[in-house]
Amino acid sequence: MALNRDRLMDVLDKAHKGPIVKQFDWDTRVIPGTIADKLKKYGLQKSCDPANPINQDLELADRFFEAGLEVATEAGMLCTDTQRAIRFSREELLAGLATAPAAFTLGEGKETAHFRHRSISDPISPIWISPLSIAVTEDVFEPLVVGIASVPEVDCLEGPSFETIWGASLRAGSPYELLAGKMQAERFYSAISRAGRNGIGLYAVATSPTHYGVLGGYGVPGGYKPERDIVLVLSPVEIKTSYENLMKLAHAYNCGGRTYGGSWSMIGGYAGGPEGAALSCIACTIMLYNVYQCVNGASFPYDLKTMGNCGRQALWALGLVFQALSRNTHICANSVLNQTAGPATECLLYESAVGMMTLGVCGASSCTGPRSAGGKYTNFITPLEVKFAGEVFKKCAGMSLAKANDIANCLLPRYEHELGHPPKGQSFKECYDLNTLQPTDEWRKIYDKVKDEAIAAGMPLS
Amino acid sequence: MDQQQLAHLYASILDTDPDAAAAAAQAVVDGGVDALEAIHVASEAITKVGDLFECGDLYLPSLMLAGEAMKRSMAILSRTIGAEQASQNKGKVVIGAVSGDIHDIGKNLVATMLSVHGYEVVDLGVNVPPMEIIDAAQREHARFIALSALMTTSMPYQRDVLDLLCEMGVRDRFFVIVGGGPVTVEYARMIGADGWGASAVSAVKVCDRLLQSNEKPPVQSTFLQK
């Protein structure tokens, strides 16, 4: 489905003619004020229940959606470059959501990934997009991507991202990013060919967070292919857009491509506690699908204190957001899972187990991850945690919310005490043989142990 | 009457209401209340706000509004007794998210916490080129430069600031602290930053320790605060 020009022009018009809102007022009054009003109006305050990290009250999720729709209608989305709010009426927002596809494909040939809207406890297998934009050195990029693309559970690729480009520091907003956009596509095509996964869908451009990577790499000869790959448009918090994002949108339109709309809300940030963050995510998702006409994406919560979303409060908010979106829209909602521990640690796998299960049962169509070691360290990502997360995500499809909640409560005590100071673990070079692309015995044993414990807790991983 | 006006000032900051804080400060001045005492009361209020935030009882928008309330009341109070005397100021900090980086939540958090703890903060916003940061630090006679980077592709600009300061022969005029999601202790050391903090609270501790050290920038070993 190509981007609609009239809707694109309407968004650009609103970004330049919408009501003026200064960013300080947006951050300190519009967002917190609107969210507080709706939490109160819909009786959503203090609804977070850490004892039940996977929400069991679906009527609550529906009330959150209604409240989120009101937040989106009243606040809109701030364009930070023009300091104007992009606003639509409630009817326009619902009509915009209605135009989003309930199913679409990425990739081509035998690697075509079939995205579908998923309901709560849906037995349809969700789509696993891996990994996140974790920086790696140039020598590691190709073997790592071959290793990850060789994981059968992986349906599409997004990261990793380059730390340097032909030896030079990769700098945001610079000509290096233009070069990196195409370089990443070329290196991806080389690696997926070696892995025997030609045709796998790609998210563009992980290496370059600004628009320059997309301009340099998407739709150019030898670059990402608009007919099978998709442009990442990642909005800054809280419910904001910018010229950078709108230029990616315009470029996707020019190329006949499609967009992924993503954002997040931090528990403890502008939106407040877990309830506020969940509400903000729902409102933001409604705006993402209207402003970017995206076919995939969503806003997801995570916790400012742990910088992850695998703790109790964040899991509750995460599950609730996707329950609300699943029950009240037909979109193909995607979440990001932010782990905090690094490769070759039990903590990383426990975070993945509980987080991926939560998303799998709460109606997410797809998930992008993992963010091993919080994405903080160069080369700290390996194919084994990618495989484990994908296994959990797909095999927990169809599980009931009640069972998932029981499993979460069983596994959370094994790792939640570590979230404030997560173990760094080991880099790809330390816990993998780069020639055979096999993990060390130590890392394999950790994987086997956690998998056995997850099975014992009730996960259908055997 | 004095106590009532001071109580209003305290409450307005605790209520995170900049307009009310400015009005309360003006009432203090108009009423002839001792401005130094009023500044002491305002400082107690903002410290309380900081404590509430650290406990999770207040969120970022309230912290930012309380910081604004403090700033506006201080501007009024200091006029009556002179900036020098009024100052609870530990030093001026020029802060910004470096080039290519439009993430502001961490930077805003650090800016506000520094402000709450007695630093005068000049916030340059996001996506700020290295030379612009240095120009501002020189113009403002800052003691600290605080650099935020939330992306690996913006981290090289933190290093650029340090390299430029050295090349321009002004490295010894500013303590440079760095932070942000992917910015590690090791990276801070490698680029020669004077301080690194894992959180907004630790950023304050790093600045305090740098001031107390009596060292001149660049410091011998990077001050780190988990």
Image: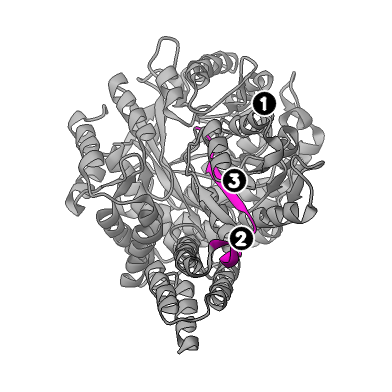
Q: Quadrant of residue A328?
A: bottom left
Residue under the point 23% across and 33% down: A8
**Mark 3: which secondary structure?**
loop
Label ID, residue B89? 2
Q: Position of residue A98 (x, y in %)?
A: 23, 44
Q: Residues within 10 Å of mark 1 (few under 14, many from 20)?
A: few
Circle 1: residue type: Glu
Residue at (74% x, 51% y) in the render = B210
* Residue A224 visible at all: no
What residue does disc 1 label?
B167
Indicate the amino acid at tag 2. Asn
Residue under mark 2: which chain is it in?
Answer: B
Q: How many marks?
A: 3
Q: Which residues are magenta?
A: B83-99
Seen at 53% across and 73% down, the residue is B42
Across and down, in percent, residue A276 comes to: 42, 62
Disc 3 with disc 1 on a shared chain: yes
Q: Is residue A11 visible?
A: yes
Judge by depth and name the residue closer to the eye, B23 or A277: B23
Question: Which circle's residue, 1 or 2, is located before the other in the chain?
Answer: 2
Q: Is residue A213 above or below residue A46?
A: above
What number is the disc on residue B141? 3
Seen in the image, is A282 located left or right of residue B95?
left
Q: Is residue B75 magenta-colored?
A: no
Q: Earlier in the sequence, mark 3 or mark 1?
A: 3
